[in-house]
Amino acid sequence: MTGDTMLATFAAPGKFYRGNLHTHSNRSDGALEPQEVCRRYKEAGYDFLCLTDHFLESFDFPLTDTRPFRDETFTTIIGAELHAPNTHLGELWHILAVGLPLDFAATGAGETGPQLARRAAEAGAFVGIAHPQWYGLNTEDGLSIDAAHAVEIYNHTCEMLSARPDGVAMLDHLLTEGRKLTGFAADDAHFKADDCFGGWVQVKAEELTPEALLAALKAGHYYASQGPEILSAVIRDGKLHVETTPARSIVLAGRASFSEVVHGEGITSATLDLSKFAGSWFRLVVTAADGKRAWSQPEYL
């Protein structure tokens, strides 16, 4: 393995845009009007937002129209959190659909979670398996959502309200089963607690439009973060050379127990050997001194 190969997210053309893919308004069970939710995210420095109200009959199957709140520095993507029976524990599915058409049809009688996810993907959505730890999804549940593009690997509301924010194990299990998925962090904010601005995505796109952002998400040209930034990641001579904002550890995690790590105080770069990941996958995890993390997308050797 010779020469320089930049990881796909960083090699993609364009610039990084910060966004939240999972949030609610009072069109379902959130506390705030859609306009106010958008205002708060824009004021907090976000470039885009997908408002994903619960697509349930009890809320009249809302697809919240946030187009009026776009401007030249802030845009929105239409989406929803979809629900249908049933996980292996008998709970309704929670499936994130980012980029739905406003005429997406209501959940049909007898429509299952996997069927609903497929219909959303066919309609053009980026489909995510939401907060798997929060409601006890297992690997078989995850495998059944065969239209998924991604797993929600950090959910801030689940951290604040139930201390169950994690989806990393689900992502790793599905990668090991051969699924080509990415991982995103999000708030799932309802604005009834301190549940906003805790997890987001940095999407590399050529322009700040819903279409360009959605294409970049589907291509995996993004990373997830709670705060740290991944500035560059380049493969050279069989090693990954990484530059980040100050961190206490820079880790490569892969199949089973495979890992490589550099520790330090305020480190901003690392060189990590890739040889043990040959024929499989790896992903990068950067942890800052305060414990907040950033996660790259899986890469394959």
Image: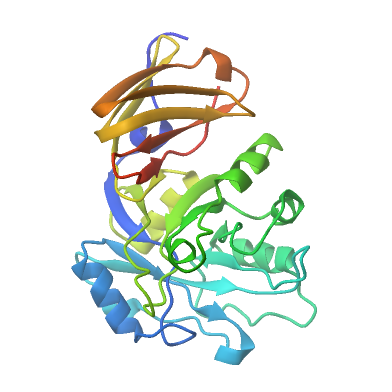
Q: How is the image coloured?
A: rainbow
| Spot occupied by residue 4 in the image (x, y as percentages of width and height) | 36, 16
Q: Image check: 35 left or right of 5? A: left
Q: Quadrant of the C terminus?
A: top right
Any part of residue 60 in sight? no
Q: Residue at x 35, y 32 (%)?
A: 11
| Spot occupied by residue 95 in the image (x, y as percentages of width and height) | 60, 66
Q: Residue at x 61, y 61 (%)?
A: 121
Q: Residue at x 29, y 52 (%)?
A: 17
Q: Is residue 151 above or below residue 229?
A: below
Count of picture labels: 0
Task: Decide which of 212, 270 is in the foreground and name it.
Answer: 270
Q: Is residue 279 above or below residue 118?
A: above
| Spot occupied by residue 251 in the image (x, y as percentages of width and height) | 43, 28
Q: Is residue 191 above or below residue 270?
A: below
Quarter-wise, where is residue 230 in the image? top left
Q: Image check: 34 left or right of 217? A: left
Quarter-wise, where is residue 66 in the image? bottom left
Task: Decide which of 155, 275 is in the foreground and name it.
Answer: 155
Task: Decide which of 22, 167 is in the foreground and name it.
Answer: 167
| Spot occupied by residue 207 in the image (x, y as percentages of width and height) | 28, 53
Any part of residue 130 in sight? yes
Q: Residue at x 80, y 78 (%)?
A: 110
Q: Image check: 70 left or right of 212? A: left
Q: Image check: 194 left or right of 120? A: left
